[in-house]
Amino acid sequence: MKGNSTVTLDIRGLSKRFGGIVVADGLNLQIGKGEIVGLIGPNGAGKTSLFNLVTGFVPADAGEISIDGQRIDGLPPHQRARIGVARTWQNARIFQSLSVFDNLLIGARDYPGESVFNNAFRRRELAEQREKSMAQAEIVLARVRLDHKADAFASDLSFGQQKLLAIGRALMNNGPCLLLDEPMAGVAGHIYETIGDVIRSEAAAGTAVCLVEHNVGFVRELCHRGVFMFTGKIMADGPVDELLKDQRLTELYFGAKADKRAAAELEVTA
Ligand SMILES: Nc1ncnc2c1ncn2[C@@H]1O[C@H](COP(=O)(O)OP(=O)(O)O)[C@@H](O)[C@H]1O
Ligand SMILES: [Mg+2]
C-alpha cells in the first residue's frame, strides 16, 4: 500500500488450517481507501478462503482483522456486513426465481430478514429501512446498467448480466470494503468493460477493493497493486507488472516448479 494512504482493511497474522491444509499462514495485508488490489495465485492458494475469513463465513485460528480501525474478527458475518464488508462469490449465487430488483434488496446492508419480533415491533423502522434500500437499489441498478432489467427474473439474465447483478448486490452494502471473487470469470465484451468501470468508480468513491482474478489483462488494467498468494502465504506484494514479470511466480502459478523450496525462496517477510 502507498505509505501515505489511509488503511481500510487491515489483516495481521491471519492463520487458518483445515486439517493438513494451510489456507492462511500468518497473513499480513493492508488495503487502502480507494485502492484496488488484485489477489492472484494458483487454484488452491487460499484466495477464496481469505475472503471467507474476512467476511466471517469461516472462523480464523488466529489473527486480527480491522476495518477502518475497528476490529471485526470474532464478529459473525452479518455484523461484519453491517460494518461494511461486502463480497461476491466465485459462483454468482443469485436467486434465480427472484427479480433483479429483489436480488438487490437482499444485499442491503441492513437487510432485516424475517422474524416475528421484527414484524410485530419494528414495523415503522422496517418500512423506513425498506424505503432506503429501494432507493439504493435504484442507484445500484443504474450503476451496473441493469435498470432495463429491474423486473426480470434473474434466471432470464445472460451469464454476464448475472455476474453484474452479483456485483450489484455487493454494492448495496455501500460500505468501505468490497471483496470480489473472480468477477470476470467467463465474461467478455461490453459486460467486461462495464464490470471494469463499476469497480473503478467504486474505488474512486473511496472503497477499498480486493479482487481475485485469473484474467491477467484485467488485473493489469485495473489494479493498483498485486498480491501473489501460494499455500496460504503472500509470496509477493507490489506493482502488478513486476509480479507478472517474475519468473519464479510464473512457475508457481503454472506449477512447473511448485515445490516447497521454490516457495521458501520467494517468501517476503511483510
Ligand atoms: N471449508 C473447507 N474445508 C476444508 N478444506 C477447505 C475448505 N475451504 C477450502 N478448503 C481447501 O483449502 C484450499 C484453498 O482453497 P481456496 O481458498 O478455495 O483456494 P483458491 O480460491 O485460491 O483457489 C483448497 O485445498 C481447498 O480444498
Ligand atoms: Mg477461489
Image: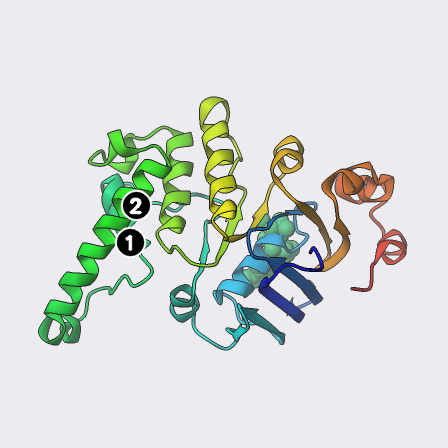
Q: Which circle marks residue 106 in the picture?
A: 1
- Residue 115: percent from the left, percent from the top? 18, 70
Judge: label 1 CB < 8 Å from ligand 2.
Answer: no
Q: Is residue 24 left or right of residue 118?
A: right
- For this orientation, the residue located farthest to the top is 189
The residue lying at 44 percent from left, 68 percent from top is 80
Q: How many marks?
A: 2
Q: How is the image coloured?
A: rainbow
- Say which quadrant the N terminus sits in: bottom right
> Disc 2 marks which residue?
95
Q: Is residue 177 left or right of residue 47?
A: left
In the figure, residue 64 lies in which quadrant? bottom right
Q: Is residue 172 above or below residue 158?
A: below
The residue lying at 62 percent from left, 53 percent from top is 47
Q: Are marks 2 and 1 in contact (CB under 8 Å)?
A: yes
Q: Is residue 6 visible?
A: yes
- Say which quadrant the C terminus sits in: bottom right
Q: Is residue 241 left or right of residue 120?
A: right
Q: Which amino acid type corresponds to the residue marked 2 in the rendered image? A: Phe
Judge: label 2 CB < 8 Å from ligand 2.
Answer: no
Q: Which amino acid type corresponds to the residue marked 1 in the rendered image? A: Ile
The residue lying at 70 percent from left, 46 percent from top is 41
In the figure, residue 65 lies in which quadrant? bottom right
Dot 2 surroundings within 10 Å: few (below 14), some, or many (20 or more)? some
Q: Nearer the viewer, mark 2 or mark 1?
A: 1
In the figure, residue 18 lies in which quadrant? bottom right
- Residue 95: percent from the left, percent from the top? 30, 45
- Residue 150: percent from the left, percent from the top? 23, 36
- Residue 109: percent from the left, percent from the top? 33, 60
Q: Which circle marks residue 17 in the picture?
A: none
Dot 1 surroundings within 10 Å: few (below 14), some, or many (20 or more)? many
* Residue 143 or residue 188, whichever sits in front: 143
